[in-house]
Image: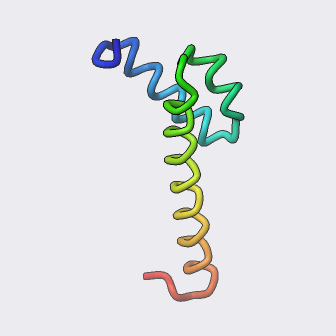
Amino acid sequence: MEGSIIGQVRHIAAKELAEAGCSDCEIQAVTGHKSLAMVQKYRSQADQKAASERAQARLEWSGSGT
């Protein structure tokens, strides 16, 4: 299923829900993932993206951004 359009939509939904701050249980309920490990993968990616954005904002705020 993951190679299908439905799988792609599921992936996008999980990614956006994680980036919006939804809990793992909420993401799992919406996407239907049976494995919590898969949901945690999306959470980890969202957390990394948020940390990167915060670091970039700090650089811009301090005037050190390029």
Q: Nearer the viewer, residue 4 or 24?
A: 24
What's the coloring here? Answer: rainbow
Residue at (57, 42) in percent of width and height: 43
Q: Is residue 36 above or below residue 51?
A: above
Q: Nearer the viewer, residue 10 or 34?
A: 34
Q: Is residue 23 left or right of residue 9?
A: right
Residue at (47, 20) in percent of width and height: 10
Residue at (42, 82) in percent of width and height: 66
Q: Is residue 7 above or below residue 61?
A: above
Q: Quadrant of the N terminus?
A: top left
Residue 37 at x, y = what percent? 52, 33
Q: How many marks?
A: 0
Q: Is residue 38 above or below residue 56?
A: above
Residue 36 at x, y = what percent? 58, 28
Q: Nearer the viewer, residue 54 or 32?
A: 32
Residue 21 at x, y = what percent? 69, 41
Residue 17 at x, y = what percent? 61, 32
Q: Is residue 48 left or right of residue 24?
A: left
